[in-house]
């Protein structure tokens, strides 16, 4: 069990490091600077927490200090996650004026509703008996997960309805955040309901983050996929039949 | 207990929705060569007639209110068919345009980019027009306009034809 715990704590951050290298190598950090910053921050937070953990083992630091660093780190990470989502939306939609005009109000209202929803449900879930710092941690985790997940769903449904083409990396970013946020949301709910031990839920969270990082790594390293028919090119007969169909459309 | 269960179900459904959207996106591009054959013809004149304010006013002034409501409902139902058709066609044209957007010939790439932009705009217009038509079926007095839609489709079709014409010589040259 100790091995599993250590593996789930350390391995995702090693993989995140590879993600960083991948982004630097294929220069995609220029396209997604917020995602890059988020990964750098996650690595820095992990390094800080490891240092405090070892200080804790030597009784130099306290458990409360560790938890407060974790809570502040999660608050900053939540902001960076939102910024990454905005960046993804910007790459896909908001830089196209005509789409931005339609999506901006949708995203704005979705965010307002999600913030209200997350606040209301968080208030229901917060427990008086729990230590204050852990309570803040759970509320933060839950709220940011709800907001992330809601915005992701709105963005995906909107782009799917409009057939907006996605490049590989945005798909990976969205899928990764989707896995991580949904499991975080479920985990926070389970904790508030005291249905499972905290340790088991922590395993679930770490496993979800591991899966999320694996998705990011795969999508970062894999070359940008072009539409299959771009590679093969249209056959003349296909184009002719396409033309015929289009001509048929303009028949009056 | 209930709210815990509800939030858990929402979490699972949201994840399923994300995975479904991404899988759908991949399968959309799996068989693109048959896409062009899925394009449906649209009689733009007939559509324009259905949504014409003058026609509606004429019918309102010459028919009894119950008859007008029935006729108007039928006309709007027919109009929704056209809008759905434009919605589907624009989706197909977006995918066909995306296929040529990275073409080596700059003329093809520019036309494809323009086609994608206009098809997306049309799809967005169609999405916004559909609820208005359905509302108009319930409230015949409601005034709404979709005059841009036939023009948009007209322009889009011309662009698609140009793109097709540009691509055929390029393929023949290869």
Image (cartoon, coloured by chain):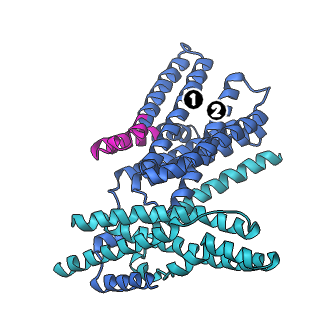
Chain colours: A blue, B cyan
Can you tell which mark lies on residue A140? 2
Specify whether B65 is left or right of B171: right
Quadrant that contains the C terminus of chain B: bottom left
Q: Are marks 2 and 1 in contact (CB under 8 Å)?
A: yes
Q: Residue drawn at (22%, 63%), measured in percent from left and top? A: B106
Is residue B87 shown above or below A239?
above
Magenta-drawn stretch contains A170:
no
Task: Examine the image and state in which quarter residue B66 appears.
Answer: bottom right
Specify whether A230 is left or right of B60: left
Is residue B32 shown above or below A101?
below
- Image: magenta residue range: A12-37
Magenta-drawn stretch contains A26:
yes
Image coords of residue B138 (percent x, y): 76, 68
Chain on which label 1 sits: A
Q: Residue drawn at (20%, 82%), measured in percent from left and top? A: B172
Residue to which mark 1 is pinned: A75
Q: Residue drawn at (74%, 65%), measured in percent from left and top? A: B141
Label 1, residues with CA under 10 Å away: few <14, some 14-19, many ≥20: some
Can you tell which mark lies on residue A100? none
Chain on which label 2 sits: A
| Badge 2 element | helix
- Count the numbered circles shown: 2
Is residue B115 shown above or below A77?
below
| Badge 1 element | helix
Tell me the chief SS of the magenta region.
helix
């Amino acid at each position: 069990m100790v091995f599993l715990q250590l593996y789930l704590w350390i391995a995702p951050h090693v993989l995140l490091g590879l993600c960083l290298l991948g982004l630097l190598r294929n220069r995609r950090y220029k396209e997604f600077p917020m995602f890059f910053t988020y990964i750098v921050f996650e690595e820095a937070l992990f390094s800080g927490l490891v240092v405090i953990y070892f200080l804790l083992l030597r009784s130099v630091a306290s458990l409360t200090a560790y938890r407060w660093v974790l809570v502040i780190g999660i608050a900053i990470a939540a902001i960076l996650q939102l910024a990454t989502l905005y960046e993804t939306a910007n790459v896909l939609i908001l830089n196209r004026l005509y789409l931005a005009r339609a999506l901006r109000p949708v995203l704005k209202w979705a965010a307002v509703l999600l913030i209200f929803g997350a606040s209301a449900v968080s208030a229901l879930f917060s427990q008086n008996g729990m230590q204050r710092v852990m309570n803040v941690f759970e509320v933060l985790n839950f709220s940011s997960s709800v907001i992330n997940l809601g915005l992701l769903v709105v963005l995906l449904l909107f782009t799917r309805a409009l057939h907006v083409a996605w490049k590989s990396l945005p798909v990976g970013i969205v899928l990764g955040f989707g896995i991580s946020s949904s499991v975080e949301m479920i985990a926070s709910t389970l904790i508030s309901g005291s249905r499972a031990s905290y340790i088991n839920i922590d395993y679930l969270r770490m496993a979800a983050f591991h899966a999320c990082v694996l998705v990011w790594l795969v999508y970062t390293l894999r070359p940008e996929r072009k539409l299959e028919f771009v590679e093969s090119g249209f056959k003349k007969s296909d184009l002719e039949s396409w033309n015929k169909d289009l001509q048929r459309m303009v028949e009056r | 207990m209930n709210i815990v269960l509800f939030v858990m179900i929402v979490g699972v459904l949201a994840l399923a929705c994300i995975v479904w959207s991404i899988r759908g996106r991949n399968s959309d591009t799996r068989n693109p060569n048959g896409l062009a054959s899925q394009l449906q013809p649209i009689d733009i004149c007939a559509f324009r007639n259905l949504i014409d304010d003058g026609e509606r006013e004429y019918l309102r002034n010459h028919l009894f209110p119950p008859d007008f409501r029935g006729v108007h409902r039928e006309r709007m139902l027919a109009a929704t068919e056209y809008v759905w058709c434009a919605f589907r066609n624009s989706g197909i044209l977006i995918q066909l345009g995306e296929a040529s957007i990275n073409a080596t010939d700059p003329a093809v790439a520019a036309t494809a980019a323009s086609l994608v932009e206009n098809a997306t705009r049309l799809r967005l217009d169609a999405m916004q027009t559909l609820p208005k038509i359905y509302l108009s079926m319930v409230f015949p007095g409601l005034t709404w306009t979709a005059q841009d839609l036939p023009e948009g489709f007209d322009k889009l079709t011309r662009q698609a034809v140009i793109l097709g014409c540009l691509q055929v010589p390029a393929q023949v040259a290869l």
